[in-house]
Image (spheres, grey):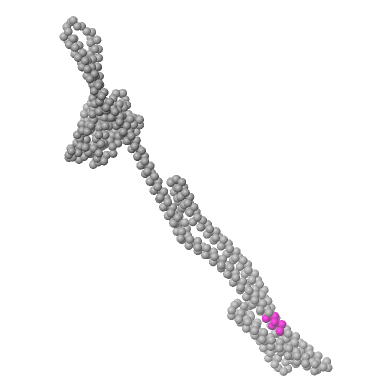
Amino acid sequence: MLRRRKIRTKLFLSLGLLTSIVLLLAFSGFWGLYRYKRLAKSVNQAAYEIKNANELNWLANALKESNARITQYRNHGGMIDSGLLTNRFIEHEQAQYNETLDTLKRHLQMYQHAVSEIETHSDPLIGSSDHRRSLAAIETAVNDLDSFRRNPDAFDYSRSEEMLERLSLIHRLTQAHLQLIEGRMTDFSRNVGGQYRAWIGIAWFSAIVSLIMVALLVWSFHSLVVKPFQTLLDGSRLVAKGQTNHIIDLGTDDELSELAVAMNGMTKRFQNTYAKLNAVCSDLDRQVQQRTREVIQNEQLASVGFLAAGVAHEINNPLATIAWSAESLESRIEEAVCFGGESIALDDELLTTTRSNLRRIQEEAFRCKGITERLLDFSRLGEVRRSSTNLTELVEEIVSMVSKVGKFRCKSLRTHASGPVFAHVNPQEIRQVILNLITNALESVSTDGAVDVHVDGDNDGAKVTVMDNGCGMSADVLKHLFEPFFTRRRDGTGTGLGLSITYRIVSQHGGSLIPQSDGEGCGSRMQLLLPAVSENEDQSTSNRHSMGWNHESIKAA
């Protein structure tokens, strides 16, 4: 419960506990001193009362002895012929008797006054009623004796027994009072012993409770203050060493817990910032790699373009000569066969073989001519006139045309478009790009394969996605896909210039061509991104091919 309190509350509770310890020890000490003071007063009172009781008893005994001597002198007075001396002794003893009696009365009065003072200011050693009753009996006996003494014949022989009884009564009363005090002293001694043991027990109890409270205070301070501080310090050191995943949990709701939460929040923000920086660095590295590949590909395309222009011009003339010669030779053979008469007789098998070889020469010559024309097209790509083009309509036309080709009829080719999508492009070049992507996809699938063409767009741009479930592409193929003369067709045909020309066209339009594939046998996906414009945009904006598009050459899925 205390772990959820504030440090100020914990300090107040610790201060209260410490104050309780001090008060307990102070109470134990002062209570012991008070009891000692009371004991000292009780002992002093007991000593005073014993002294006074002994003096009363001694004076009573002295009166009794004086009376006995007076009686003895009177009894012996007739036997000794010295009456004058005896009378002097009797007078002396009577004077001594009277003085002792007066002393007894004064002492008794002082004693009673002292007892009254004791009863007023403190508890008497003897019960007040017993004390007063005993002293009152002594006072009555003394006053009766004093009244009897005043009689002229008090010391006569005839009244000696009466005097002795009064003296004996006083002696017995003083003796009883002394015994009463001694009995009270015995009880007091026993009470003091019990109180002493109680004081010792209270002192030990106070000491044990104080030690327990001190231990509790030390434990509380360690668990509620020192340990959270140490945990916070250790966690801060771990975070400083780089363990940013470490979470500091103090299990409290005090100011230290707030500091730990702030520390955890700072660590979390540092982790997020670090992760963002890593992501930015990774993205920058990826962009650098992409730009590097683009530069290399552009350099390759430029080199191939210059080479293609020269090669095409140099090869076209020999190819034309070969084609023309083969055609001329075939024409002469036909003329010789048809118009030569019987003088020219050719073997049918030789004639058939010759015709076949001549046709093959012509076909291969025209095929080489097609390659040189592609090379010339590759080298002559430049700025062309562009306009707002409906890509949905363009794709549907291409799909309708390709679906009728014989080798593609058995394959599924579907178009997905939600409506017209416009892009700022050259229609003929983009037709060539989309046609190339669709035919490549159809050639990569098997007989029962499927190719889907999705056309989407928004205010920022248009997107044409060609998806197939064919053979797919490996990471190495994706890396070199747009390089000139790079081909991985399953039938081994193709020049490897189709996608290079396609990529160059898309690049000049300010768009992106993104190939994606999960691997061989997992199909492929080609995503064409082009800048979009409104349907009624003027053609004078043909050079706006950089409408915020981030031109990327390859973006692997």
- In the image, residue 363 lies at what x, y percent? 23, 19
Q: Nearer the viewer, residue 31 or 263?
A: 263
Is 67 on the left-hand or right-hand side of 214? right
Please identify the residue farthest to the top as the structure is shown: 343
- In the image, residue 358 lies at what x, y percent? 23, 15
Residue 21's place in the image compared with 229, above or below, is below
Q: Which residues are magenta?
A: 52-60
Is 39 on the left-hand or right-hand side of 20? right
Q: Nearer the viewer, residue 383 or 120?
A: 383
Magenta run includes residue 549? no
Residue 178's place in the image compared with 543, above or below, is below
Residue 19's place in the image compared with 502, above or below, is below
Residue 181's place in the image compared with 258, above or below, is below
The quarter in which the C terminus is drawn is top left
- The overriding secondary structure of the stretch rendered in magenta is helix
Q: Nearer the viewer, residue 545 or 452?
A: 545
Could you say which quadrant of the image residue 51 lies in?
bottom right
Could you say which quadrant of the image residue 548 lies in?
top left
Is 93 on the left-hand or right-hand side of 232? right
Residue at horizontal 19 percent and vertical 6 percent from the top = 344
- In the image, residue 339 lies at what x, y percent? 16, 9
Q: Can residue 421 be seen in the rendering of this structure?
A: no
Residue at horizontal 27 percent and vertical 28 percent from the top = 305
Is 430 on the left-hand or right-hand side of 555? left
Q: Nearer the viewer, residue 354 or 155?
A: 354
- In the image, residue 233 lies at what x, y percent? 47, 51
Residue at horizontal 60 percent and vertical 81 percent from the top = 117
Could you say which quadrant of the image residue 26 lies in?
bottom right
Residue at horizontal 21 percent and vertical 37 percent from the top = 543
Q: Can residue 182 be seen in the rendering of this structure?
A: yes
